[in-house]
Every structure is written in C-alpha cells, then in structure tokens.
Amino acid sequence: MRGKEYYSEEGIPIRTSIILCGSLIVTLAGCNSISSTEERPVAGQEDPSHSESHPGNDQPPAISSGQKSALEDQKLLTPEEVIQATKKQLHTTVPVQLPKSMDISVDHHLTAETSSRSNEYTIQFIEMNEPVPINNDALKNEEANVAVLRGMKYNSMSTAAKQINYQDHSDSEGEAVDLGFGIKGYKDAGAGSQFIGWNEGRWSLAMRALTEQGDDLEAEAKKVVQYLEKHTLPVPHEAGMVMLDISKTGGEHVQRVAWQENNAVYEIETPKGYMEALKIAVSIQQNH
C-alpha cells in the first residue's frame, strides 16, 4: 500500500508508512485497557522506528508528537518495571505487596496476568520468549512459570490466622538434627517421603524429599538456614509458613510461602526451585 506524501520545509518529500501506523494501532489494541482512559503497560516491544529504511535519504522521516508518544509507550520494560506496572492493574482494598525484582531465564521477557476484587488480588508472573503486554489475550492459556502472588483480606485476624499452617516443630516426635546457627530441626518419614521441620522467629518451615534421597534433605535444609541467616523474610503478624519440596520426580513441585499481616494473608507460589521462593519473599521484605 502506498503511503501519503508530505514535504519538509526544504521541499524534500517524506513518505510516512500507513502500514507502520496500522501496526502500532493493532499492538496498542491488544492491550485491553481496563478503562477507556488507562492503557495497560507493555512488557516489551521493539521500536519500529529502528527497522524502517529510508531509501535515498540519510535523514529519518519526521515523526509526529502522537507517533513519538506511541513509540515511547512501547519501550522494552525491565523485570523491575513490569513488577511495578502490575500494581496499576489492581483494583483492591488489600495493601499490595510486591518484590523488587524476580529472576527470569536468559533472553526471556517478564509479563503478567492480573485479577482483583475488593478483598483479594492475584498476579501470575510469566516469562515469554517474546515481549507480551501485561494482561494481553495471548496470556490466557499460559502457565505462571515464574510465580503467583496473592493477597487476601479476611473479616478478622483470627480467620486470617487459620489460613496459615503454622506448626511448632519442637512438639514433633521426629529425630532432632542440628541445622546450624543454633537452630534445631526435626526429621520424620513416611509413605516414601522424608520431612524436616524447624522454626525461625514467627516462621514455621518444612522441607520434603523422597526417602531414597538420603542425606540430601538435611543438607538442603542447612542451606535454607544459612541463607536466612543473612536474608530476612517478611515479618508476620502473627505467623508465617514455608513449605519446600526438593523431591526428585518427573513433575513440577510448587514451593509455597505464606504469612499473615493482621487480617490479610499473602502467598507466594512458584514452580521453580525452593531458593527462588525464598528470594521472592526476601525481595518483598526489602520492598516493604
């Protein structure tokens, strides 16, 4: 399709591609705004002005202020910027808690799908091979392969406390093991699995492995204790729980961290390794 011709003050013909403008319109239309006045942020998009050729003219064609604004809106967002942009998509009375950053795979792009109501919100963080806008329709069938973050508000602190599976592991009849730094864990086994649980402050922590993994469980638990000696989890009011799974089987294992903040409960779930779950929780504390 031939574009319209315009002329600069020097009389040089400038051709503006209608196809380029059309592609911008299609891209922006895929953002599915919550309201007519609010555009969803774009998790990443190549600037079309970098790829357009200018035959016979060393100077790029003039770009209107409207085109400049559209191109700027489609700049590639960093993972940190994507995380902060998700907050603008939430409409809830629950105080939102987000990490400062998240680890993603090399050459991948972070995006998210969000949902919210007055008393709860959910953010599914997804890494993609290509940049995809937050809440784009292309994410409908994608799994949250980075993490899911939830916040839920209850009618009372007592109801919120019931959502946390806090355990005092010193009451366990399991074998006591030294995890270092003055922390004692309690080891138990059953149904082809072995478990170790311990407490740190207001947190209850438990880790699972297969029976045949032998001493791996104790060694990995010691790594957690060592990590938390230098990194701080969010401070629960009143309790928090960590459930980690290192069993070596074919399927994915969801790592879960949850804590109470008065009458609200916050959850982190990730299909990645247990250390990623802890890093996200620590990052939320740093951003709090």
Image (tube, rainbow, N blue to C red):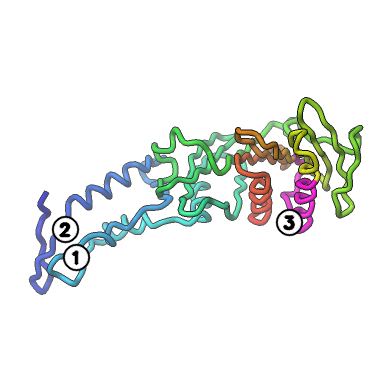
Residue nearest the observer in this picture, 87 or 190? 190
In the image: residue 254, left or right of residue 259:
left
Q: Which amino acid type is marked by label 1?
A: Pro
Q: Which amino acid type is marked by label 2?
A: Thr
Residue at image coords 40%, 40%: 136
Q: CA distance from mark 1 to mark 3?
A: 52 Å
| Disc sitting over residue 16 in the figure | 2
Asked whether 134 falls inside the magenta stretch, the response is no
In the image, residue 138 sits, relative to residue 66, either above or below, namely: above
Asked whether 226 falls inside the magenta stretch, the response is yes
From the top left corner, tell me how far across and down residue 201 is, in percent.
Answer: 83, 47
Q: CA distance from mark 1 to mark 2?
A: 7 Å
Q: Quadrant of residue 218?
A: top right
Do callouts 1 and 2 mark residues in contact (Cβ within 8 Å)? yes
Mark 3, other Cα within 10 Å: few <14 / some 14–19 / many ≥20: some
Q: Which residue is mark 1?
A: 61
Q: Which amino acid type is marked by label 3?
A: His
Q: Which residue is mark 3?
A: 231
Q: Quadrant of residue 62?
A: bottom left
* Upstream in sequence: badge 1 or badge 2: 2
In the image: residue 86, left or right of residue 120:
left
Residue range corresponding to the magenta coloring: 219-241
From the top left corner, tell me how far across and down residue 17 is, in percent.
Answer: 17, 55
Determine whether the residue tagged by mark 2 lies in a helix, strand or loop: loop
Residue at image coords 66%, 56%: 286
